[in-house]
Amino acid sequence: MTSMLDAVVVGAGPNGLTAAVELARRGLSVAVFEAKETVGGGARTEELTLPGFRHDPCSAVHPLGAGSPVFSTMPLARYGLDWVHPELPMAHPFDDGTAAVLARSVGETAASFGPRDAGAYRRLVAPFLGKWDTLARDFMSLPLTALPRDPVTLARFGLAGLPPSTWLSSRFREEKAKALFAGLVAHVIAPLGGFATGAVGLIFALAAHAVGWPAARGGSQSISDALAAYLRDLGGTVHTGFEVKRLDDLPPARAYVFDTAPTALARIAGLGRAYDGYRYGAAVFKIDYALDGPVPWTAEAPRRAGTVQIGPTSRDIGAALRAVTAGRTPTPPFLITAQPSLADPSRAPGDRQVFWAYGHVPHGWRGDFTDSVERQIERFAPGFRDRVLARATAGPPQLAERNANYVGGDIACGAASGLQLLVRSKLSLSPYTTPHPAVFLCSSATPPGPGVHGMSGHNAAKAVWRRLRAS
């Protein structure tokens, strides 16, 4: 007779694998079950276009991964994880051939905004410089799963970040700083005037100065593979190609931890309408490119940047976000693009490159956004289409098929707007617990939300540990 496991984790994305590792590190018996044939969730790497071109179907650049409080406690380098850094974390080009940059250096970043805003940017980030480790841990543990290590800095961050990003960017007088900051907020597909959106932009900026915006050598799959290998060395097991449709499909366990969308958890665990009020947000249309050489950006800075935001102005970005939130396709779109080959030539053969781009579209949208995306890229990189060897497109239906957590193409696993930006997936001091005492939620539908950082899994594992210890 098989003995009962301490914990079963459903879903082998970064949060599920992190939760499993954290429980296994405490000496618990853990098994992970994943529907796909490989681990990874939103951190996978595949040959989507041509042989030898290694693409990330979803997340590609990882400021919150390199700066993750929980990843920093794990020996992931021993299992093959190597962060590689482009010369510039991010660039934001404009129609006049110039660009603002988010550099490792605060000075270089401030200088790219021009003399009228350089001082304002320095004053904005100054209180938090050199404090990333404690700030990230405190901010990414909200609601508090541990006492703040630096409550004064956390409070200062809250005062700056809880208002809408439009309030924070009102410190700037020129468009370059306003646009770059608006683009940072748009990474979570949240309207710029929303609650706590200032915190989103600020945390991404601070991450660039503290740890950079790196990619994982070989692709995002390296993060997931390292977590899975570490888990196995701790005695945990990983089962792939195993779709869970109900709790009875799983072996007996004292706790079940779901790295899934809340609505999927409710369906599998028989929780009825427990998450009916949870909102899913706007989606993305993503294109992975095989290129015969680098993107021919007009501005110089994007040629050195791992990530390029294409807005160009804060007004354009705000309009695009309002459009998709209202269910309309934006014209022109706001794009986030990534150039992994700049820091990792192994991602494509010879001098060729992989390139990654997405634009925001309404939830569940079924159209083809390819032409709109490419016209916007060509605006800042004339001749781009001539470099394309092959492309792989994925709209909301295809993204949801690749990853069941992307309901309707929502890569954030839930709208990151309004109170739901911070209050995920329910208003509770323990959002990782569910109405079932043995069932827990650890996906990015729980705090601190989207991103490959493992902190939702880490926080959920604490809740599981406390429950099991008390039983």
Image (tube, rainbow, N blue to C red):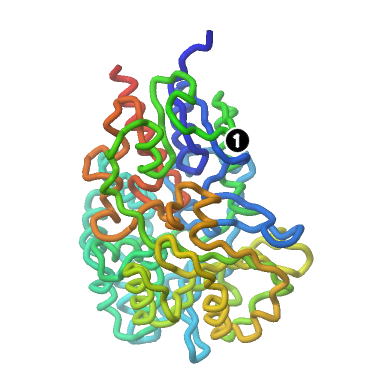
| Residue at left offset 55%, top offset 68% | 357
The reply, left or right, for residue 274 in relation to residue 361 is left
Q: Position of residue 106 (x, y in %)?
A: 42, 71
| Residue at left offset 62%, top offset 63% | 340
The reply, left or right, for residue 67 in relation to residue 293 is left
Residue that extends furthest to the bottom in the rendered view of this protein: 96
Residue density around tag 1, few if under 14, some if 14–19, many if 20 or more, within 10 Å: few
Q: Position of residue 128 (x, y in %)?
A: 32, 60
Residue that extends furthest to the right in the rendered view of this protein: 350
Q: Nearer the viewer, residue 363 or 123?
A: 363
Q: Nearer the viewer, residue 103 or 181?
A: 181
Q: Amino acid at mark 1?
A: Gly
Q: Quadrant of residue 171?
A: bottom left
| Residue at left offset 53%, top offset 46% | 41
Q: For the C terminus, which image quadrant?
A: top left
| Residue at left offset 43%, top offset 62% | 283
Q: Quadrant of residue 296?
A: bottom right
Q: Position of residue 449 (x, y in %)?
A: 37, 50
For mark 1, what is the residue?
241
The reply, left or right, for residue 98 in relation to residue 50 is left
